[in-house]
Image: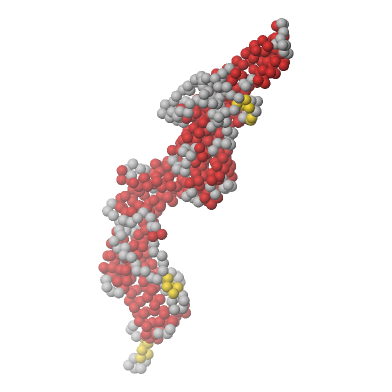
Amino acid sequence: MRFHSAACAAVISAAAVSSASAFGFSPVAVPPRTIAQSSPKPHNHRLHPVAFLSSSSSSSRSFGMTSTTTTAIATSAPSSSSTSLSLAAGGGPEALEEYAASFASISKSSKIQNPKLVKLAGAAALPLSYLAGAAMTPSRRLAARAIGGIVTAVAAGGVGKSAVEEDVRKGCPAAIARRLLELGLEDANVADGVERLREDYGVEEVDFVDMKTEVYGVYLQGMAKNPLLKTSEMKELTNLRNALRLTNQQLGQAHAEAAVKFFRDISRFASKEELADEDHPDRISLDKYLFLSERAFRQGGETEEAFTFEMSRIGKAFDGLTKEQCLERVENTAKPFYERALNSARSKLDSGAVNPEMLSRAKATLGLSDEVAHQMHIEEFAKEVRVQLGMPETDDEDDEEEEEFIEDEEGNLKLVEREVKDTSGIKFQEGAFERLSKLQEVLSLSDIEGDLEISSTVTEFWCNTALAVMNDAIAKTKSPDRAWSIIEKRQKELFLQDSSMKKLLTQITIQSLGTMLEKTRLFADVGNQAATVNGLNDLIEAKNICKEVLTHGGWKEFDDFEATIFDPNDTSSACGFLSPSVRYNMHRLYFYRSISKGGDGKKKVSDE
């Protein structure tokens, strides 16, 4: 039986599964999935037994590479969009493990792992196909057989070689992931090791960049899937970027593409209401992704324009968040970490192991603005003030008693007055001043800011004492000298500055005398002359007592006591709430009551 050489070549081409399989080689390299963080391990290229695989129809390949044939496998290679984060909730390394495993495209019995050897097998298909074609060409002439061998080699061997190289390139992304796992991100040679894979797998530079950005995205998604954020993860991502040698543009592309996949996977199982809940785990994961992205861009030295572009792309992928919304969520993610740093500074304050520079580094690492960090410093100082007073760190408003109202006869609601709590026992502990001074220095707060926080905390306690003492002095149960000594002692117990105490004493005096004047006004409104005169006489006496108390301070602000306390043009003064007509009426009642007849029958103003 005689065959034409072209027909023989076509038969061989159609019957060939692939040249690599024909010679007993597997088309994809799959190194062992072994993580060696502590010490780098070289690739172990081992030969596996022959694995014959049946052919299937052609399919498209990742990264723009196509193949005319593919093999039926137990686990098919996924496209770039099929990676599921549900496989990688434990972190970046776990995500790479699952990613590499998902690229397994040969049966478990296959042993070939060396991509260079596989490509060599494909190249060997050309001469072997030539010999087979020449042997099957029915001609006694050497030239005719040579032509038949060439046609067969080109048709069968060439196709087989192309399919082998294509399958080798297809295994490169998994090889990148495994190389990172084997050497570890901090290995000095990991970047060179990853770069050598491009040559080993015969991948074009542009395709290799796409592969590296996809591997970076897989790692990032796996890291963000775990809601628990660790500050070490920022350095981990920096090491990953360096290991893959990604530029700023490539890094931005990796974050943007991964954001689309990440939000898609999250939104499959979480509703919009759940993602709006700041405490929901999936919402926390999204915020973590935003935080890691913001830190990666800032630490990469992006320009403000480029940073805005990259964050806007991620915000768009996250259901249309604006840049401002993204940064607000980033800030809310960073603040708890800085709070822990501040708490640590307070706990180590006495050891001398903390300083302002340490907090500055922590602030820079987390990307907090100076304004936000400074406000947190003030809040932390206020917590320590309360602790040194023997109180809880924060004033939990939820624990406060709710205000109660009662309805009067006319149906109006009135606030139920509660008894003022005794706060006379609240004072700073021994050594509190020295500790607060150290903390103020560490937190870089000014004296004014420190005094203001102390004043805002202790004002209520000091006022309770001062108001009670002033009322006792007015009631003549305490002498002015005794009243002032109690007020001054309380000032020292609460570290209250003179400047703050002057304002408070003015307000307390106005409150005490203003209350008496308000009661007297009620008598004047109904024309009760006797009660009005008596009330004004009591007010005058109380004014003289308060003036005597305040003169012990030696402050010039009270030299003109009447102008300070009873300024009619100042609505906040003791008489500022009275209209001119009311003041005139009260004065008229007092004046007429003071006029009496003398022995000669003439009217005169009494000494009173």
As drawn, is 438 to the left or to the right of 235? left
Count of marks, rendered view: 0
- Give the quarter of the figure containing the N terminus: top right
- The percent coordinates of residue 92 (x first, y second) are 48, 36
The x, y position of residue 288, in whole percent, is 49, 43
- Inspect this view and state whether residue 566 appears: no
Which residue is nearer to you in this view: 168 or 569? 168
Q: In this view, does 202 lie to the left or right of 436?
A: right
Residue name at image x 70 percent, y 6 percent: 142
Q: Residue at x 34, y 69 (%)?
A: 419
Residue toward you, 366 or 530: 366
Residue 356: quarter of image: top left
Asked which quadrant contains residue 518, the reply is: bottom left
Which residue is located at x 43 percent, y 69 percent?
572
- State the colouring used for the structure image: secondary structure
Looking at the picture, how far across and down is residue 371, in whole percent? 46, 49
The image quarter in which residue 123 lies: top right
Compared to residue 52, the image places residue 509 above or below, namely: below
Q: Which of 462 and 177 is in front in this view?
A: 177
Taking 236 as reference, is 401 above or below it? Answer: below
Q: In this rendering, is residue 187 above or below 589?
A: above
Horizontal and vertical percent for residue 427? Answer: 30, 58
Q: Is residue 393 visible?
A: yes
Residue at figure coordinates x 57%, y 36% from the top left: 82
Q: Is residue 598 above or below residue 205?
A: below
Q: Which residue appears farthest toward the front when viewing the image?
A: 1
Q: In which quarter of the image is the C terminus?
A: bottom left
